[in-house]
Image (cartoon, rainbow, N blue to C red):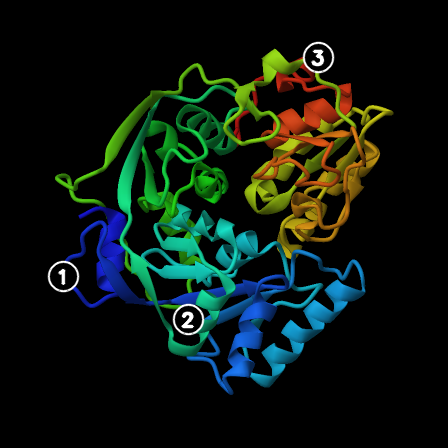
Amino acid sequence: MTITEKILAAHTGKEQVQPGEFIEARVDLALGNDITAPLAIAALRERGITRVFDPERVVLVPDHYAPNKDLLSAEQCKLVREFATEYEIKHYFEVGRMGVEHALIPEQGLVLPGNLVIGADSHTCTYGAMGAFSTGVGSTDLAAAMISGKLWFRVPESVKFICYGKLRPWVGGKDIILYIIGQIGVDGAHYQAMEFCGEAISDLSMDSRFSICNMAIEAGAKSGIIEPDDKTVEYVKARARKPYKLYHSDPDAQYAKVYEFDLRNLEPQVACPNLPENVKPAAQLADVQIDQAVIGSCTNGRMEDLRTAAKILAGHKVHPRVRLIIIPATQEIYRQAIREGLIEIFLDAQAAVSTPTCGPCLGGHMGLLAEGERAIATTNRNFRGRMGHLKSEVYLSNPAVAAATAILGRIASPEEIIDTPWVDGY
């Protein structure tokens, strides 16, 4: 079996499962946010359900429109807050203690290798970076899991992506996943488990691995996953609150397809409007002017990302035409960025730094685009109208490209700002 099939089998009580098989599996964690949880909560209340299956395995994070951007978001967050109190949900993360959910949950040690995690948010697939099976579901599925601790799945086929080669400076996990999506398309892994392996993957930091698995959904996948190794264990051991198990694919496991990519010459990649598959090297887009740059989100708001941005921005100013918004993904990341002097670098560059929030990623708040404006963002989607007006445009990149672009006012490669190779994840 593949790692995905092994995890699903273990949570179903079966020795083996097959792609296409319908199963009912035990859920280790069920996650909701301020947009999706209210619908699940309403489903529980309508049915007179007065308790969840396990108050320690339901997680609620108000992060999309929080801190509250308007009256409606205030009501949504209030509903989630009151539910968490009434149903004694242990892991409710209030403003000031919360973060962008898919950065916060691993940081808190709530997801572990070998877990089966569902979340009413499509980027729940992020946790595959830890060797867990994690996938996004609808709010009614979240409600079912909150009640029973179980959910049905169709076992996905697995597709293997073998990535060879030592990466160039300023190239990281975001570039790898953008390149892969550019090669296979936004439906290239429809309802499949994307399994990433090879030298280029094993050399990556955990932060870069999270970026890769986070965007598996942008290829239409059910999940993304990376087999756990020493880096995974090192990340987990200081955070784990419960025992966990490492799973690996068998040498004779069957895959629907195997892709092989030599990434030695991969350049920083940019996804152009209006799909994540419309990918080009950053160097080919130097004539594209930008009005706003966003560095943050559940894709690229981690410490490695902020360090990379700071390395580019140090000693420079944001272009007079450009608004640069930087959003640390969790309070702890924010705190660490202060300790390391990164926030001062951002402020000296004339960037705006925000408390953790999803904010502009989904066109929520903290940086919507007006008609005709263009943004470069380290977020995960660039659909038409995603970050504001239907006639605005979003380009997706890694933090180094976003920072360089903010300085020059046009899409730029990091080498245009700093010619000293620097590798710390990038």
For disc 1, the marked residue is 15
The amino acid type, in three-letter code, at marker 2 is Ala
Task: Determine the image quadrant of residue 53.
Answer: bottom left
Residue at (76, 65) in percent of width and height: 72
In the displayed structure, does residue 412 sit left or right of residue 154? Answer: right
Check disc 2: other Cα within 10 Å, few if <14, some if 14-19, many if 20+: many
For disc 2, the marked residue is 145
The x and y percentages for residue 231 are: 38, 44
> Closer to the camera: disc 2 or disc 1?
2
For disc 3, the marked residue is 287
For the residue pair 418 and 276, the one nearer the viewer reads as 276
In the displayed structure, does residue 367 sit left or right of residue 220? Answer: right
Check disc 3: other Cα within 10 Å, few if <14, some if 14-19, many if 20+: few
The answer for how far apart the CA atoms under marks 3 and 2 are is: 49 Å
The x and y percentages for residue 263 are: 40, 20
Q: Secondary structure at mark 2?
A: helix
